Image (tube, grey):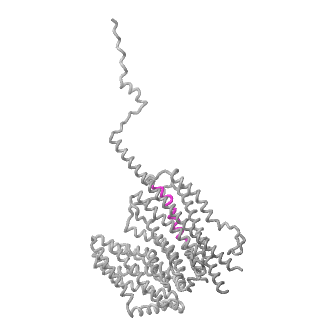
Amino acid sequence: MNDPTSIRPPRPFRLRAVLPDLCLLAAMPLLVYSVHRVFIDTPNEQTMGTAFKIFFFHVPMGWLCMLMALVAGVAAGVQLRRRSRLAGCVALAAAEVGFVTGLGVLLTGPIWGRATWGTPWTGDARQVTTALLWLVIVAYLLLRHYGPRTSDRLAAALAIFGAVNVPIIYYAVKLWKTLHPSTGVVGSLPPEMWATFWPGLGALILCSLGLFGLRVRQLVIAEELDAAWVQLDERSQST
Amino acid sequence: MRLLRQAALLLRSELRQELRDFELVLTAGFFTVVLLAMFYLSFASLQQRAHLGAIPGLMWLTIAFVGVLTLTRVFDREREADTLRALLAAPVDRLAIYVAKAAMTLAVLMICCAVLVPGLWLIFPAGAAFAAAPGSTALLALLGCAGYVAIGTLFAAGLATGAGKNTLLFVILYPLTTPVLMYALVTTRALLDGDPALPSYLGQMAALDVILFAAACLLFETVLVGAAGPRRSSSSARRARPSGQVPRDMSREPAP
Amino acid sequence: MDEIAPKPAPPAPEAKTDAKAAEYAPVVGVSVADRQKLAELESIASAKSARDYEHVIWAYGVLWALFAAYGLFLWRRSARLRADMDDLNHALSKRAP
């Protein structure tokens, strides 16, 4: 514990440091409760039957994808404005969680569509908007991981453009829908089912925030390790 | 005024370079003709009523592909001669560089549209609507290409480094330009159908172009300076490690 | 010989029904065709329900698999960072006098 060769002294306890772990711990019982509510306490929906139960996790994933895209855009703005590495880490972590939640929406949506209307892709405006937004998130991740060494600001510009594009994509898709009408109407949640919806939303938010916080922590540590190695190398060369 | 004057000077230099060998215009124009030939081979046997649905998609897909080719080539010149840093060191407004490059790319794309639109009309008889409304067609081509160029120039400039990862331009550009292309698709279909809402669609496209240009202008200097900034030694962190590996998830923001 | 008195006639069924009419509703029979139709509809409904459950299990399975995959990715990254930190500590200890 008091090893003089360790790179940093032991830190005092900070709630911020354990917040991601607390989020994940809190998500577990809430997840179990929400699954119980969805399958035991909630009756089947009249027109769509049992398959409607996918809705209770499909919609929160969609909201989380949009939220993470916005967080990535804002963090990228801070990264450009203040040259902040922490903001860069936050943007990358948000994009990764947005990728996971977006993929969840794009996979569960066709499963639900197939069960309800017999066709996986209905061309619904929200479905197409989410797909296009997810492509922008993937482009950002590819640029961050495979871009040239000086592409950090470019990636930040991409994230900002992506966030600005969210309402533009939505209106563009609505306009495009005049050429391609849906094959099925995606209904809204009946009022009596909202009580079942909130625990699922809460569980997924806590889970996503926990994973997001862990990833930010990892990225910050990786940054600090890189700087430490370079400093060590420079000192070795100077002596 | 200074900005416009500088942009005009830079554009004149670009045009002079282009007029020497017509490289951009010839390659982009030929690529357009090749695509038209492929469309003819693939879709000429479609029924007449399917043409109305096919023409907008074919037109704007061609613009998307030719656009990336042109943008890559416009900035390749800077990359090959490493003149980007010299340009930034000169007392030139950064935005003038953006305006000049965007204007050059737009000019090339408009020349390609001059080949593409008559070509589509020849292949698909439903394209006669283009000839019936030449003014609207020209305006539609200008607004659609302008929106594409606004986004494309920003990101092509960001990738215009010595490392030259051109393939990423495709990856970045297509998702971001999808809304512009969707607007262009719907407006083209409205033109072909003789839809009375065509002026409204053209107005919306113009508004979208203004938004995209404004956003690109705000971000251009930051992106360009970042792209042409001092390259950190790529192997310093890797060399320092005994394993020679660098964890991939690190962002390498140059030290202020 | 005595005449055998005729047994009193049982009460007429109509009279009995009339008497009890107020208490019981008349029974309506279900035809064979109706019964077959009902069975067919029930089998369609149970098949849809079974198919729906299969889709629900797939959807939930996909979601949990995605989160588990990302969790595994984070875990592996942590292991790599820990190894890197150990290497750095080792390099520092070698350098320290």
Residue A96: in magenta span? no
**Res B194 → quadrant:** bottom left
Q: How far across and how far down the image is residue B105, in percent?
A: 42, 85
Q: Residue at x 68, y 67 (%)?
A: A14
Residue A220 visible in the picture: no
**Res B118 → quadrant:** bottom left
Q: How far across and how far down the image is residue B132, in percent?
A: 30, 79
**For the C terminus of chain B, which image quadrant?**
bottom right
Q: How far across and how far down the image is residue A128, in percent?
A: 43, 67
Q: How far across and how far down the image is residue C70, in percent?
A: 53, 66
Q: Is residue C15 left or right of residue B169?
A: left
Label total for image: 0
Q: Residue at x 36, y 46 (%)?
A: C40
Magenta-drawn stretch, dominant element (helix, strand or loop): helix
Vertical placement of residue A234 versus C77, above or below:
below
Nearer to the camera, A23 or A232: A232
Nearer to the camera, A160 or A176: A160
Residue range highlighted in magenta: A51-71
Residue A165 visible in the picture: yes
